[in-house]
Image: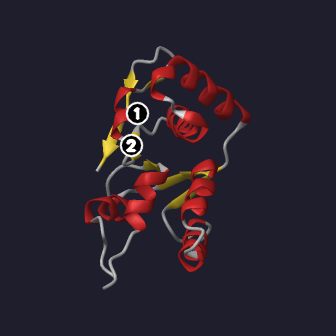
Amino acid sequence: MSPPVIADTGGLLRALARTPEGTASFPDYQAVLVTAAAVVVPGLVLAEVDYFLRNERKVMRKLIAEIFDPATRYEYEVPLPADIARALELDAKYAQLDLGLVDGTVAAVAERRKIYRILTSDRRDFSSLRVGPRLNQSLELLP
């Protein structure tokens, strides 16, 4: 098993994507899901995934069932008020990135949980972002 990972919306969507034949559309993203010791899904990410899967209700119901099944490695992370406040601070500090609340919350949860591995397709924003009290901790972007 590899260390835990925080799932961002784009990374989670790619990890779940399937070809018409049922194989992984993005096997490198799926591999992160199946090898991580834990996959932390922030609540705002789940809401955003739901938006993108609005025409794929069966897939969304399956994902929710897996996230809340204690036998899986998924961990649903409720954003704390401090996470929301920190997300807004990071959004203001890195204004040129236009992070927004969801990506800011992913970074805030990573910072609070000290899990710096992020499953994401958003390389531009997360590669420039630094977290931690001194904003000196970079994030490891997967895959």
Residue sitting at the far right: 81
Give percent across and percent down for residue 88.
63, 27
| Residue that lies at the very extreme toward the top in this rendered image | 134
Q: Give the amino acid at mark 1.
A: Asp
Amino acid type shown at disc 2: Asp
Q: Residue at x 49, y 52 (%)?
A: 9
Side of 47 relative to 11 (left or right)? right
Quadrant (top left, top right, bottom left, bottom right) of the N terminus: bottom left
For residue 10, side relative to residue 56 (left or right): left
**At numbered mark 2, what does the secondary structure look like: helix, strand or loop?**
loop
Between residue 81 and residue 11, name the one nearer to us.
11
> In this image, 140 relative to 135: left or right?
left
Residue 78 vertical position relative to residue 113 in the rendered view, above or below: below
Q: Are marks 1 and 2 in contact (CB under 8 Å)?
A: yes
Residue 122's label in the rendered image is: 2
Give x and y (percent) for residue 91: 56, 26
The residue wearing badge 1 is 125
Query: How many marks are shown on the rendered structure?
Result: 2
Relative image position of residue 27 (x, y in whole percent): 27, 66
How far is the residue under mark 1 from the one under mark 2?
6 Å
- Residue at 34% x, 83% y: name it: 20
Q: Residues within 10 Å of mark 2 (few under 14, many from 20)?
A: some
110 shown above or below 74: above
Helix, strand, or loop for circle 1? Answer: helix
User: Residue 16 location in percent, x, y?
Assistant: 42, 68
Would you identify the image quadrant in which residue 34 lies?
bottom left
| Residue 44 circle label | none
